[in-house]
Amino acid sequence: MFRIIPLIISCCVVGFSVCAQKKNDAYQLQIRKAVFPVKIDGVIDEAAWLQADVATGFHMVLPMDTSAARLRTDVRMTYDDKNLYLVVENYTIGDGPYMVESLRRDFAFLKNDNFLLFMDPFDDQTNGFSFGANAAGAQWDGLMYDGGKVDLSWDNKWTSVVKNYPDKWVFEAVIPFKTIRYKKGITKWGINFSRNDLKTTEKSAWAPVPRQFPTASLAYTGNLVWDAAPPAAGANVSLIPYLLGGMLKDYDKATPTKYRRDAGLDAKVAVTSSLNLDLTVNPDFSQVDVDKQVTNLDRFELFYPEKRQFFLENGDQFSNFGYSTIRPFFSRRIGLGGVPIRFGARLSGKLNKDWRLGVMNMQTGKQEETGLPAQNFTVAALQRRVFSRSNLGFIFINKESVNYDPAKVTDKPVYNRYNRNMGLEYNLASSNNFWTGKAMLLKSYTPNKTGHDVAHAANLQYTSKQWNIGWQHEYVGRNYNAEVGYVPRQGYIKIAPQVTRLFFPLSGSVLSHGPQVTSTWFFDEANMHRTDNETMLNYGIVFRKRNTLNVWASNTYIKLLQPFDPTNTGKDSLVNGSQHNWNTVGADYVSKPQSLFTYSLSARYGGYYADGSRLMTNTELGYRFQPYVSIALSANYNNINLPKPWGNNSFWLVGPRLDVTMTNTLFFTGFMQYNGQQKNMNLNTRFQWRYRPASDLFIVYTDNYLPEPFYVRNRALVLKLVYWFNL
């Protein structure tokens, strides 16, 4: 078993050795209080703007990070007693329309001409806020975490306007102080501005950022220097009620139509200017997009991301604890599958520059048909910043079945009376972001499960312009149990090194290219015998127009630890202990984002279980009538050839999608998913009208069909009205 303590110590030494002053501390923008009112109209004629300092002289990040940006960008900021104001002049060159996907909120950064603001009110280079817009006026906003990631599920009240001119487009915004969180009295905030222009394929930033990192990297922010401490936000309480009506018809069960009449309430209370209390009573998430289906050929549970805003907003302290396949907390375990959520509360935010707190409690109702009792979920997380950008974290998770005795259950599934998890982790992030890593230790507590109930993992990664070198190992005991987490596999030890080398031609159509080698090894916990390994060699090419090509080859070995159907259709299973080995080759290509017609192509061919073969192709096509209509089609095909009783199996997965953005407040989305493996066809349409900031009307219609013979399985229609108002 690997020892976690020495690696934690070595990571701490690395973190301490690279602790240094912020890289772009010399970049400063002075912000002064406005004497006269500011009108948000995209016209820079107010006295406040004429008197404001200008952040200009942006630096190129892509294609190369060694020169000044070709395009001029000027940024001004000011404030008054209630609001923070921003105006940006994005100058352009050449003719032709601006490149945007649509008017939809929270667009894809690299597929739009856009401007983004990254703001770090605590200047801790770890957490913050992001605001921005594309050249057509679609808004972008998100919470920043882990030093450079943006959670776009965050949605709050602010207003912006984009106005187009022959030589530039102007973005003007007002952000209420009540919308963001900051510590009273701090007069220096971390800040950076980022711009993407598809016609010139240039990405730039005000404070320079190395090209291997996103411009959102808070390690490379400059400073917003206030002429006085920002004003207190004052009383900050928001109520967000909803009303819902709907109907559901289940044709499979031939039950009468069910009618829904629901109401619920969310509330946001600013306990301090940096600590927020979220409350919810009878929440509903019917407007959330359905999961994107996949052809499932995996031996373990698949991961589907959380999409419900209550769990996502400011939830990174909970959901990002651990690794992608060792998550002690995964919010999708709460309230899905028809289980009602009665109420919940979450207290989260900054206690000061060094301490961060998150506490959540959710109560669900019981489910009669499965015998699932009412359950209470409690999660507590505490984080302490160490060195320049690293942190130590603690988490505690408790799932408790309310008024439930498993010994008295005779005719229903039996559930544990409780399941608890406790964990520690150290997150390393050097001051220049070249060194990152994590070391983690978890222990679970479940009735009648003791011993081998620990999980730990550690990784260390070095990222420079030319090299990306990483090491990761994991151990999960066979009795480790995270019922409110995502841990699809137990009883193993894993080793996963990887190396990437990039080359940068001085001229030509290729921007960068280079090889990558990854190898993943699994060993049985009990005897350290190899059970799985996959080694892959990949060669990647990034072109100056931002289209990409990857070609790769891999070798796979698997020793089955339990019976497995290689088609996941229920035909038959390969026996426990059987060994399988095969080679695969593949290629992936993604077209340049500047074109109105975009596409990506993937293909792989090689061996499969039981000396079989597998061919997989995947195609993504898209066309946009910018900025109002976007049409997309995805098609995935798998052909699996195996000996009897499976024989030849072909699975299609097809998903056309239509997005219509009539304005930046009026949206329609419709998509269909046909899954040949599951023999299901799903149709989902959603209309959204944002009639006021953060207030919406949703109309959602969903159908599920059985393709052969074609008939409706179930059908639902929901109308939901949400209104946000401040007290």
Image (spheres, grey):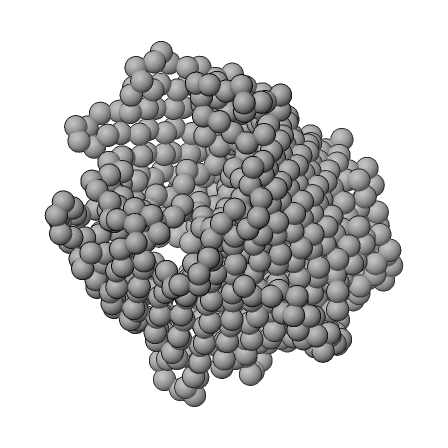
Above or below, 16 relative to 416: below
Residue 576: x and y in percent read: 30, 50
Above or below, 701 relative to 75: above
Q: Residue furthest front?
A: 527
**Residue pictured at 50% horizontal, 24% vertical:** 372
In the picture, measured across the screen, residue 153 lies left or right of residue 562, that is: right
> Quarter holding the C terminus?
top right
In the picture, measured across the screen, residue 136 lies left or right of residue 58, that is: left
**Residue pictured at 84% horizontal, 52% vertical:** 184
Residue 255, quarter of the rendered image: top left
Residue 252: x and y in percent read: 29, 21
For residue 330, say whether it is visible. Answer: no
Q: Residue furthest bottom?
A: 506
In the picture, measured across the screen, residue 386 lies left or right of residue 364, that is: right
Above or below, 416 relative to 653: above
> Quarter holding the N terminus?
bottom right
Along the viewing direction, whichever of 719 and 137 lies nearer the viewer: 719
Residue 718, quarter of the rendered image: top left
**Residue pictured at 37% horizontal, 14% vertical:** 257
Along the viewing direction, whichever of 49 and 717 lies nearer the viewer: 717
Residue 695: x and y in percent read: 59, 33
In the picture, measured across the screen, residue 219 lies left or right of residue 372, that is: right
Above or below, 678 relative to 280: below
Residue 547, quarter of the rendered image: bottom left
Residue 92: x and y in percent read: 51, 68
For residue 275, say whether it is visible. Answer: yes
